[in-house]
Image: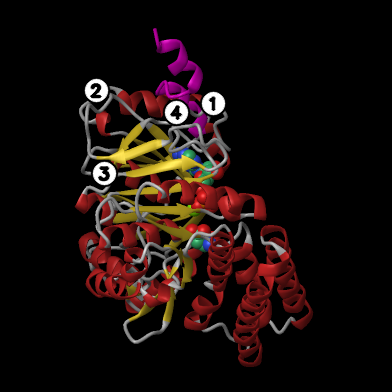
């Protein structure tokens, strides 16, 4: 289909009747010029509420579960009342009640089992996106735009890694052709749930927290869209998280590789896996602010005239550093590393940074804190004999750390930059624990003490001349 535009609206852009109206208006305007498909997140904070409800169900907390379900219902019913004329509300309210009863059915099952099977959790948590899609499609219809709410479990086919599934692009492309294309060809503006999919045999899955960006990218890739626009609550991709660095500036353009490095190293504005399906096909992405429609946003695409030096600084606070050390000559450091990486693969954990010492035959690696218990279990199982025989020292874990990353294609070969960055951090009296540089020279990762992380981010941001004030004064 020629000139297809995919647009994704995040939680805050869908967070109230007013916000849904704005999102719908943006979609309608674009659809006047070309075919459009929309991907939506759950209303802001709904996914957290659903996940917390499931924890309560598992713990047998009936009162807590019921109170949360009531909150969920009130929010969506109220939104429906505010969004739609009275005459159009009834079928939508019925849809909301149906979806909430589905959630209750799953949560009640968990309460009975005192367990939270990942597959059922994925089915339950995607109900937030289904509620949002229902409301948006109903509003578009009320505005006389031919629309339909589509559950992405009928389109996006994934593996069976519940909670963090990976799409299978060939069957997804087939399903998109079958279940989505006819709507677009018929002139409709489909509203598709972000975040979820299903295995080939129909078991519901989700793509990881913040996964609606990834859903939109998957659909853009399989439909060969001409562009993807990701609508959020900031003016685009910035030189740092504006909540940490008030002086952060919006970047006009970034490359796919830069955006991916930023996302993988903690810039929440994009889900880390968003860019891969798009870069392959060179589909341009725009990050835009649904609260400031006059702002152009950031264009993510192929490298052009890359500006020199660093482009942005990111950080991750919820990480842990795991260290392993061989106790003697019985076990080589290389072998220890191989065994440990094997354990990490089995735990389905991602290694964010690695550092090693050949002399001491030790190495340490950084993982997300939420993955730590799975990582430790897998390491202790895999290395149980070595631990029992004392071939390796007890595994040590440091949770009082944070990751800082400096990203920029233009950093390649800039002499002295790393030294300036380390000095800036040290001048803030923040301890540097480990340093790694990706082989692409695109990113320098630095592990620092957790309590100095934000200070270090601000210092590096200033040292690299990334702030708004610096840039504005630099313009002639
Ligand atoms: P959405 O709900 O629209 O998906 P998110 O909350 O997931 O939005 O992502 C947007 C947020 O990402 C912003 O509000 C901002 O605080 C945060 N953020 C972190 N790093 C960056 C960055 N480098 N550029 C822009 N925003 C960032
Ligand atoms: N609603 C999901 C989440 O909060 C997915 C998303 O918003 O992208 O993680
Ligand atoms: Mg997001």
The percent coordinates of residue 408 (x first, y second) are 31, 33
Give the mark nearer the N terminus: 3 vs 2.
Answer: 2
- Quadrant assignment for the N terminus: bottom left
Q: Earlier in the sequence, mark 2 or mark 4?
A: 2
Bin the neighbour count of mark 3 within 10 Å (Cα to Cα): few under 14, some 14-19, many 20 and up: few
Tell me, yes or no, whether the two marked residues, 1 and 4, touch with CB atoms within 8 Å.
Answer: no
Outermost residue, top direction? 476
Q: Which secondary structure lies at badge 3?
A: loop
Question: Please, is residue 354 above or below residue 120 in the view?
Answer: above
Instruction: Give the crowd class for mark 1: few <14, some 14-19, many >=20 residues within 10 Å.
Output: many
Magenta stretch holds residue 464 = yes
Q: Would you name the residue on which mark 3 appears? A: 438
Image location of residue 94, percent across then percent down: 66, 78
Q: Earlier in the sequence, mark 1 or mark 2?
A: 1
Question: How far is mark 2 from mark 4, CA to CA?
Answer: 16 Å
| Badge 1 element | loop
Disc 2 is placed on an element classified as: loop
> Which residue is depicted at the point 34% across and 75% down?
179
Principal secondary structure, stretch drawn in magenta? helix
Residue under label 4, please give it.
460
- Residue under pointer 2: 415
Mark 4 or mark 3: which comes first in sequence?
A: 3
State which region is magenta: 456-476
In front: label 1 or label 4? 1
Decide: few, some or many residues near mark 2? Use Cα within 10 Å; few <14, some 14-19, many ≥20.
few
Q: Earlier in the sequence, mark 3 or mark 1?
A: 1
């Amino acid at each position: 289909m020629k000139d297809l535009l995919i647009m994704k609206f995040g939680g805050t852009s869908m967070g109230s009747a007013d916000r849904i109206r704005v999102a719908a208006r943006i979609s309608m305007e674009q659809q006047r010029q070309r075919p459009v498909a929309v991907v939506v997140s759950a209303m802001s904070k709904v996914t957290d509420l659903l996940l917390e409800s499931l924890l309560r169900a598992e713990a047998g907390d009936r009162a807590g579960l019921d109170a949360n379900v009531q909150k969920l219902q009130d929010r969506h019913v109220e939104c429906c009342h505010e969004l739609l004329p009275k005459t159009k509300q009834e079928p939508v309210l019925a849809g909301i009640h149906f979806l909430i009863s589905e959630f209750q059915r799953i949560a009640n099952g968990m309460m009975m089992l005192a367990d939270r099977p990942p597959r059922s959790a994925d089915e339950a948590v995607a109900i937030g996106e289904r509620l949002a899609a229902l409301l948006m499609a109903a509003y578009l219809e009320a505005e006389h735009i031919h629309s339909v709410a589509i559950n992405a479990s009928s389109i996006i086919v994934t593996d069976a890694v519940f909670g963090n599934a990976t799409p299978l692009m060939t069957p997804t492309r087939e399903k998109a052709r079958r279940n989505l294309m006819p709507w677009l060809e018929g002139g409709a503006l489909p509203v598709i749930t972000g975040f979820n999919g299903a295995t080939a045999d129909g078991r519901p899955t989700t793509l990881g927290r913040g996964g609606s960006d990834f859903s939109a990218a998957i659909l853009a890739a399989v439909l060969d869209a001409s562009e993807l626009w990701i609508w959020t609550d900031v003016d685009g991709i910035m030189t740092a998280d504006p909540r940490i660095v008030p002086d952060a500036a919006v970047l006009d353009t970034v490359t796919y590789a830069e955006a991916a490095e930023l996302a993988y190293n903690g810039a929440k504005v994009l889900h880390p896996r968003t860019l891969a399906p798009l870069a392959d096909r060179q589909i341009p992405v725009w990050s835009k602010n649904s609260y400031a429609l006059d702002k152009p946003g950031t264009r993510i695409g192929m490298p052009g005239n890359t500006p020199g030096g660093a482009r942005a600084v990111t950080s991750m606070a919820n990480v842990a550093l795991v260290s392993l050390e061989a106790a003697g000559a019985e076990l080589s450091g290389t072998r220890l590393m191989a065994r440990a990486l094997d354990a990490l693969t089995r735990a389905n954990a991602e290694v964010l940074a690695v550092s090693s010492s050949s002399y001491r035959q030790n190495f340490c690696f950084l993982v997300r804190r939420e993955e730590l218990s799975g990582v430790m279990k897998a390491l202790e199982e895999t290395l149980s004999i070595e631990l029992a025989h004392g071939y390796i020292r007890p595994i040590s874990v440091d949770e009082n750390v944070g990751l800082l990353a400096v990203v920029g294609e233009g950093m390649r070969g800039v002499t002295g930059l790393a030294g300036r960055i380390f000095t800036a951090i040290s001048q803030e009296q923040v301890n540097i624990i480990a340093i790694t540089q990706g082989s692409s020279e695109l990113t320098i990762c630095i592990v620092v003490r957790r309590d100095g992380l934000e200070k270090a981010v601000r210092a590096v941001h200033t040292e690299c001349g990334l702030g708004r004030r610096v840039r504005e004064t630099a313009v002639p």
